[in-house]
Each structure stands twice: as structure tokens, then as C-alpha cells.
Amino acid sequence: MKKIKSTAASAFIVALTLTLNAGAGTPKNGDHWVSAWSAAVHAPLPFTGLSAAPVLENQTVRMVVRPTIGGERLRVRLSNAFGTSAIRIGAAHVALVSKGCGIVPQFDRVLTFSGRSSTAIPAGAPVLSDPVDLKVPAFAEVAVSLYLPEKTPASSTHFWAQHETYISGPGDFTGQSDITNPSTRTSWYWLADIQVRTSGQAAATVAFGDSITDGVGAKQGEYSDWPDDLATRLADGAGTGPQLAVLNEGIGGNRILHDGAGASALARLDRDVLAQPGVVNLIVLEGINDIGWPHMKARPSPNDSSPGQGPFADERVTAQDLIAGLKQIIERAHEHGIRVFGATLTPFEGADYYSADGEVERQAVNQWIRTSGSFDAVFDFDAAVRDTNHPTRFREDYQSGDHLHPSAAGYKAMAAAVDLSVLRSF
């Protein structure tokens, strides 16, 4: 009996010590790190017709992003999640953008990693920079410049960037105010996150989805996708309330249950949502590719005019399969104290992979999203963009031409369907 009491007493002392130590490490003013901008990294997409990811050697890549909340101290997270060997970053800078690939010299900061100006990122790992003092207003464009001294394939990327990326000729241009005659791409490389140190009232909402979240259909550089429109609405109505960032974790072609265009939603949830600092809300818009891809038509061979079975025909899913996947996302996010909001799947009649069977599945999933009570709240994107006279199709001015991806006006209507008071009630 004495031994049991002694063990219990020891456990109590250890627990108390841990609690006190945890409290000692918490800033008294409640400041904490919050993701202000983020993108889902993935392996280069293996689709025909897409340009290959670049291989950089003795070159600088300058990427422009736009955080949706501001701060006076920031750090950058780089990712080698899909690399098979360590990559060396010879130098890195973060700066405010003047125009194009130009930066403002007085707002340029060297990024260090454990005090060093270079770092090696192990295969499969991320790395956080040391914090720097740099006042970044909400919605200001920020450039992250990386110098790659060794031959480095861009194995961890985000294909659909919202701004041009600039790649230099030979040399380290990370601290240069401009890059002369750069080549351009519309992808980001190794850049996963910009975090700001901010008050305890600031937090983040993750928009988790596929190309309709990624912003396909909107013009790159105009920030007219629905997550950016939502961030603007939140900022316009914030007043003296807390800042609420919106993080776009969409990947074009992504699915809930299968890999292909990036890891599946279930596989990437931990990295792209749960590991982000300051996240309190998650909006999920996924599933239309799970329904549509198995109905994708194969390209006819040169000697055969009739297309055969599509490449994803064996990956058919049912509404119940998708509902099971969504339930997993809800439960795993709830374990981390994150509220989960369901967004209904938007219409797709007229799209290349539309089928009557697929429409039945979409309607069943949407019915469950609206009525099951599984989500903390529901935002009805389907109702916001569908043609009231033909509800299986987009309103004509709300689609970008392929009957699958919204236009800028369609994205704005989706953002307007989000109840801001629900997001702010965290």
C-alpha cells in the first residue's frame, strides 16, 4: 500500500512540474504564432501536358504570396515533404514586394535557421526559419527568395500559384531588389507557410479542398478565388474584433479517398490542417473529383477512334464511401479542437467527367452534408451558384467555361454564402 501511495505521489509531482513548466513557457500577453498564409505542397503532378517541375542549380527562386492577416514578427516554413534526399538552401530572404519581382530594400530581411544563413532540409521534413522583425500589413504581397546552390529538383511544389514565381539565371539574388530577366512559372516551390506572431485573439480558418478551392477558373494574380474573397469579407467586417486568417489548402484534382493530384485529403489532413498553428476553423469542400474521375474518358489511341476505359475507372466510390471519409476528417479535426464546416458540392453537369450516376452521388452527399448534423455548421455553395432553372448546372455567369470551375463572380457568390458570425464565434 505504501508503495502505491509513493508512486501516486511521484506521479503527482511530475505532473505538477510539467504543468508549471508549460505555464512558464506561455507568453504572459497571450501572443502566439498563427499561419497567415499557407499552401498545400505536393509532388509534381503526373499529368500529360503539364510542364515538368524545374531543376535549379546555382539559381534563385522568388515567390510572391499574400498573407490574409498582418503582424510585426514572422517566420517561414519550408517543406521537403516529397523530396527523396536532403535539399540545401544556400540563402533565404523575406521582403515586401514593390512590383513584379521587385522588393522594397528597407523591408527586406535575411532568414536564418538556428542562427545560420543556410540550412539542409531532410527528405520528408519541414523546416522553420528563425523569427524576423518585419511589419507586414494584411493583404500585402510578400516575397520569399531562396538560393539553391546545388542541383535541386523541385520535388515539393504547389502547382497552381496565385502569383507568378520568378527564377533567376546563375547566382544568389536573394538580397537583390530586382531579378534581371527572370523566367516565370505559376507554381510555388518548397514554400508551405508564413506565420505571424500575434495576439491571443487572432486565429486561422483553413479552406480544404480541390481545384475549386485552389482557385482554378479565376485569373492568377487577382486573388479572386473564394478563400481570398472570404478573407476580404472577414477583414472588411472585423472592426475591432479578432483577426481571422484564411488559409487556402486546395490542390487541383485532389480527392478524399485516392491519391493522384497530391496525397488524398485523408492522407494530407495532418500536415495541411492539424499541424498549422492557430487553426480554429476548417471548411471542407472535397468529393467532386472522387465522383467524377472514374468517369473520365480515355483518350483514343492513334489507330482507334473510340475511347476505351478511363484511367480511373477502377476507383469508383459511392456516396457512403465519401460520407465515411468526411466523417473521418470531422472526427480527427475535432480531436484537435478545430470546428469543421461542411460545404456542399457544386454542380458539374456539362463538365467532361459528368455522368447521371455521378449526379445521383453528388445529391446524396449534399443531402447528408445539409441534414446529418455531423458538421458544426454548413455553407451551401451548391445553392449559391446553381442555375435555379437547371439546378444540376452552374448559373452561366458563375462558371468559367468548363461547367466545373467557378468564374470570379461564382467564387464571390460562394464566399458570400459563408456566415461570418459562425466563423468568428470561436
Image (tube, rainbow, N blue to C red):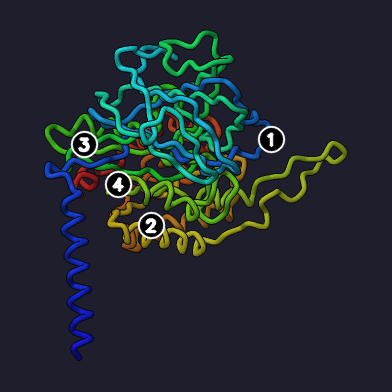
Judging by the rendered image, the residue that carries numbered circle 1 is: 48
Q: What residue type is labelled 4?
A: Val
| Alpha-carbon span between mark 2 and mark 1 | 34 Å
Within 10 Å of the Cα at label 4, are there few (<14), some (14-19), or many (20+) other Cα atoms? Answer: many
Say which of 309 and 121 sits in front: 121
Front residue (pair 29, 159) = 29
Q: Which residue lies furthest to the bottom in this view?
A: 1
> For the residue labelled by badge 3, is the local secondary structure a helix, a strand or a loop?
strand
> How crowded is the residue under tag 3: few (<14 C-alpha within 10 Å), some, or many (20+)?
many
Picture residue at 55% right of the left edge, 40% below the top: 86
Would residue 154 be found to the left or right of residue 391 on screen? right
Q: What residue type is labelled 3?
A: Thr
Mark 4 or mark 3, which is nearer the start of the sequence? 3
Q: Specify the amino acid type for callout 1.
A: Thr
Which is more foreground, mark 2 or mark 1? 1
Residue topped by disc 3: 198
Percent of width and height locating residue 97:
36, 17
- The residue drawn where x is 45% and y is 33% is 191
Q: Is residue 395 visible?
A: no
Residue wearing tag 2: 369
Kind of element beneath mark 4: strand
Q: Kindly identify which residue carries mark 4.
A: 279
